[in-house]
Image (cartoon, helix red, strand yellow):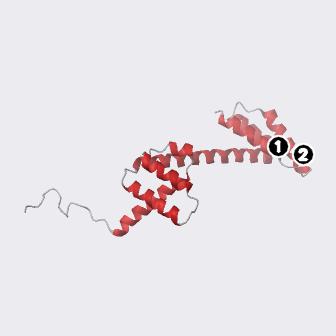
Amino acid sequence: MAKNKNTSPADEPFISKSQIKREMDALQVTGLELVKLTDNQLKAIPLDDQLHDAILLARRIQNKHEGFRRQMQFIGKLMRQRDVQPITEALDQLKGNHRKTTAHFHSIEQWRDRILDQGEDAIQELCESQPTADPQQLRHYCQEHQQQMQHNKPPVASRQLFVYLRQLMSSQ
């Protein structure tokens, strides 16, 4: 009997059982991330019907112990049979969008806090960077905030200022 010259054991890279287990665990973690996505986010991920159905079933499992664990193992098994690079790239894209949104939100919060703390100086600086900003409206929110703080009222003006800044900075 002649050996096949195309497949020799020396040509195949050695992969330890530990490495295989780590890769399977990573796929299960990716599967859990997919289960936690909203319906709209899940639509942005390139999934075949079988994997999509398995993810939807995992969402419906009420008992989050053994049944859920077995379903997650099944999702991991399905993912091992597929090219997961497009899936992980789409997940990374979604995470990147979330980080950008969070950073933008924090930037708006910082501007609100600066305006309420520094007053006119911060208003002038914002108006220079945002030409469509209404300095009179910003001053009004600042004054309302000061009055609300003096009378121990809820910070309604602070919230209104945040909404105004979000609209202003989103229209860029």
Task: Say which residue label 1 marks.
Answer: 157
Residue type for callout 1: Ala
Residue 121, quarter of picture: top right
Q: Dots 2 and 1: beta carbons under 8 Å?
A: yes
Tell me what residue is drawn at x 70 percent, y 36 percent. 167
* Disc number lying in front (2 or 1): 1
Task: Say which residue label 2 marks.
Answer: 147
Q: Residue furthest toward the right?
A: 151
Residue 75, quarter of picture: bottom left
Viewed as shown, does residue 48 lie left or right of 156? Answer: left
Dot 2 surroundings within 10 Å: few (below 14), some, or many (20 or more)?
A: some
Query: Alpha-carbon distance for marks 2 and 1?
Result: 9 Å
Depth check: give the residue in front, 145 or 37: 37
Tell me what residue is drawn at x 69 percent, y 44 percent. 108
Label disc, if present, on residue 58 of the rendered structure: none
Q: Residue furthest toward the left?
A: 1
Quadrant into which the C terminus falls? top right
Residue type for callout 2: Gln
Viewed as shown, does residue 120 lie left or right of 65? Answer: right
